[in-house]
Each structure stands twice: as C-alpha cells, then as structure tokens.
Image (cartoon, rainbow, N blue to C red):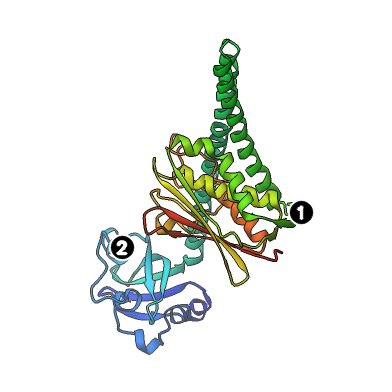
Amino acid sequence: MEDIAQRISDGIFIISRDLRILWANQAVLDATGYTMEQIIGKTCYEVTHRRDTPCQPPQAVCPIDEVKRTGRPYRVQHTHFDKHGGKVFVEVEVHPIKDRDGEYRQYIHVTRDLTDVLWADEELAKAHKELQDLNQMKIDIISNLSHELRTPLTVAQGSVELALTKDDPEMREELLKRVLRSLDRQNHIIENLVTLSLIYAENLKLFYDRVELRAIIEKALNALDYQVRQKSISCNLSIPEDLPQITADQNKLYLAILNLIDNAVKFNKVGGTVDITARCQDGNIVLAVADQGEGIDPEDVAVIFEPLTQLDHSIRRRYGGTGTGLTVAKHIVELHNGRIWVEENPGGGSIFYVSLPVDGA
C-alpha cells in the first residue's frame, strides 16, 4: 500500500487527531521541498500554510475539523506554500481512518495541485473580459463615427434647404460657405480614416518632393480659420526666413500638421493661444505646436497616439473627433523617418513636437 501511495502524483499525508503529520508520500516532499525527517511530527498547518495556528474560518476552513464534526469526507480549496514561500493552489480532500474500536484517530489528507487549472480559468476570465471590452469599443467606435459623419451632413443639408428659401444674396452666400465648411470637415474625417486604413494595410504610398514647411502650416491655418475664429483663438506663427526645405510628401505632411493644429484648436480654451514655432537642429526641422488647453494627464500620454483613442468616450463629450488625428499624424511623421512626442506646456496645456530630417527618407 505504501508503494502504491508513493507512486500517486497527488500529495498524501497521514495526519493524527492533533494535526501532526505521521507520514507523507514523495509527491508531498517534491511539492514542499522538505525531507521526510523535516515534516514528521510537525503540524500540517506549519508545513503547508507556514503558520503557527490551525486554519480558522472564514479565511481558511480546516477540512480535518469538518471531518471530525461530521464524520464524513470533506473537500476544500486551499492555498499552500512550499519551504521557500512559493504559493500553490490546491484542492484538499480529507477522509477519516477508523481504528479497530471504530474511533477516528487518523486522517488521509490528499492534495491536488490546481495552480495550472486556476491560472487557466483566470486567463479565460481575463480573455472574456477583454472580448467584452473589445465589443464595447466597437460599439463606441461605430456610434462615434456615425455621429461625426452625420453631423456635417446634417449641417450641410439644413444650410442648403435654408439657402433655397432665401432671396438675399449675402445670406445665401453665408449659408453656402457653411455647407463648404461642413463638407470640408467631413472630408477631413474621411481622409484620416482612409489614410489610417492604408497605413495598417502597409499600402500608403508617399511621393517625395522638396517642400516649404511654412507654406504647409499656413495652408492648414487657412483651412481651420473658421474654428479659430469661432473660439476667438490667436494663432502665432514663428518660423525663421532661412528655414531649409525638407524632403517630404507634401499632401501627407499637410494632413499630419493639419491634425496637430486642429487638435490644438479643438482642445484649447476660448480666447486661448496656439503658438507654432519651427527651428533647425542637428540636421532636423523641429516643429512645435503649443496650446493653452487643459493639458494631458501623465498616465494618458502613452495612449493618445493609439488608434481611435478618445480619453472621453462619450459622444456627448465637449469635443468632437474620431480619435484618428494623432494616430495618423504619428504614422505619417514616422514614415518620414521623423519623431513625434508631447510635453506639458509650462503656461498650461500641451506642446506637440515633430522632428523631421531635412533630407527626408
């Protein structure tokens, strides 16, 4: 019988009524790291729980106490420790052993290692939670995109319908300008989405030329003129006259810079300032776009360039957007062998930096 017990992979103890270990098989010695001489005569809670007192509910139910109380086998899950403090999750099953007088004087204490099973269950639960989060993210993205794409269309449609009822040329011209602004906004959203899809499909083609950074920035500021005036924001452009040209894809670089300035305007305070500066440093052009908004929490800095990231997920949030602008800007800059990062603005808000090599890719 001892030979059979030694060959069983589960840990087997023989324990007395006063909870002292009388015998253990090799599986126990392997799991705990002790020798037979080190555990014989010691209590089970000293060896398996590394404690000085017996297990007590509700923290840990002693299965031997339950067997003493009911006279029936009892099973429970416990956390055991080896001699070095390593944690093992086990299922403990205790059976009483009757002597010739019918008294329960010893107990068979069987432990089965559940660590891998419980870790697998934990990983399964984690994967299930991640899947639920992913599904919710997809719902949020679809809702957000629907809202962002529908809004400019609604404005454009309403403006056209209103323009058809007006005889005043100035009023009709203003309404048509509103239509153009709305369609430009929608085109910007779609351009970001298409560019992002091409980036992830590794199918975005760049057409390089020598370009003037100032011209690209001025074009972006002109495109955002309405948003700037709507929030009474002052845009300050400071670029040296002798700033060298860079080798870049003008259209893609324009989209990246447009996204950065749009971000600075969108998250700025009413009446705030956007400072745009550029300088030549170590063979690179370093562009800085600073705003006076609420700034970015340090823990959020690591995720703001992630795709479809919105630090506030509600479509009722104060600021619009699909969460693609900074991602597109980051990838375009990196495709030009450049670098993009963000720092806290000492005057409040954030400063986004872009470093691009003068000689391009």
Indicate the position of residue 60 as horizontal and vertical percent values. 30, 63
Measure the C-alpha gap from mark 1 to mark 2. 80 Å
Of 89 and 61, the residue lying toward us:
89
Relative to 347, say whether 91 is above or below. Answer: below
**326 relative position to 17: left or right:** right
Indicate the position of residue 66 as horizontal and vertical percent values. 29, 61
Of 329 and 197, the residue lying toward us:
329
Of 5 and 281, the residue lying toward us:
281
Indicate the position of residue 232 as horizontal and vertical percent values. 42, 38
Let me know if residue 315 appears in the view: no
The outermost residue toward the front is 241
Rendering quarter of residue 101:
bottom left
User: Tag 1: Cα neighbours inside 10 Å, few (<14), some, or many (≥20)?
Assistant: few
Rendering quarter of residue 248:
bottom right
Let me know if residue 204 appears in the view: yes
Q: Nearer the viewer, mark 1 or mark 2?
A: 1
The reply to whether dot 1 and dot 2 touch (C-beta < 8 Å) is: no
Mark toward the start of the polypeptide (1 vs 2): 2
The tag on residue 207 is 1
Residue identified by numbered label 2: 67
Going by the numbered disc 1, the residue's amino acid type is Phe
Relative to 146, say whether 212 is above or below. Answer: below
Indicate the position of residue 292 as horizontal and vertical percent values. 40, 50
Going by the numbered disc 2, the residue's amino acid type is Val
- The residue sitting at 27% across, 73% down in the picture is 17
Relative to 166, say whether 335 is above or below. Answer: below
The tag on residue 257 is none
| Label 1: which secondary element | loop
Of 15 and 270, the residue lying toward us:
270
Relative to 230, say whether 51 is above or below. Answer: below
